[in-house]
Amino acid sequence: MQHYKTSLADEAATLALGKSFAHCLRAGLIIYLNGDLGAGKTALTRAILHASGYVGTVKSPTYTLAEPYQISVQGNRIKLMHFDLYRLRSPDEFTEAGFRDEINTETICIIEWPDKADGVLPLPDIQIDITILDEGRDVDIRAHTDKGESSLSQLRFAPNL
């Protein structure tokens, strides 16, 4: 399966990665975002959304747990759900909130803190792990499904863009 590693020197590099990653999106993708608090998960999501045509404010769904967005993917309007499960007390809360209905073949789901809903979430198509360094971030992106493999094969990113 596709595996991509890179280092990001600063927020500008994170935004550039998000812009590049937006070209990989397709309906139905499930993307896990892992990283400590402050790693840049929401900043990366914001960059992906803006590069996909969303022009409004992108806020972290830390308290609402989920925020829906309409974006453009290959000329089509697609719903993207941004989940932040940090405040989930148990995996059952994800199901009880009706969020499982958002995981379908039409909606792109970006899920921060997916471990909080372990056992309830399906396998991700793509997993992005962000590690905080003394200077910058390391990013490890892995495809886990054929759909993820196909999408990730479209990634064209050079960190010093």
Image (tube, grey):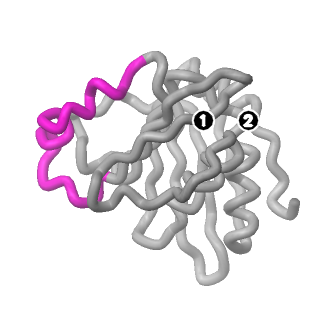
Inter-mark Cα distance, 1 to 2: 12 Å
Q: Tell me the residue that label 1 is attached to.
A: 71
User: Is 154 above or below relative to 161?
Assistant: above
- Residue 96 falls within the magenta-colored stretch: yes
Q: Are marks 1 and 2 in contact (CB under 8 Å)?
A: no
Q: Which amino acid is tagged 1?
A: Ile
**In front: mark 1 or mark 2?**
1
Q: Secondary structure beneath disc 1?
A: strand
Residue, x 58% and y 76% (percent of image)?
Answer: 133
| Residue numbers of the magenta segment | 85-104
User: Is 147 above or below relative to 139?
Assistant: above
The single residue placed furthest to the right in the displayed view is 161
Residue 17 position in % (x across, y down): 71, 53
User: Is 129 above or below relative to 3?
Assistant: below
Residue 8 position in % (x across, y down): 70, 66
Q: Which amino acid is tagged 2?
A: His
Screen quadrant of the N terminus: top right
> Which is nearer the N-term, disc 1 or disc 2?
2
Q: Where residue 3 is drawn, which disc sits there?
A: none
The single residue placed furthest to the bottom in the displayed view is 134
Screen quadrant of the C terminus: bottom right
Residue 82 position in % (x across, y down): 43, 45
Q: Tell me the residue that label 2 is attached to.
A: 23
Q: Secondary structure beneath disc 2?
A: loop
- Residue 103 falls within the magenta-colored stretch: yes
Residue 69 position in % (x across, y down): 49, 40
What is the crowding at mark 1: few (fewer than 14 residues within 10 Å), some, or many (at least 20)? many
Q: Total of numbered circles in the picture?
A: 2
Residue, x 75% and y 45% (percent of image)?
Answer: 20
What is the crowding at mark 2: few (fewer than 14 residues within 10 Å), some, or many (at least 20)? some
Residue, x 51% and y 68% (percent of image)?
Answer: 39
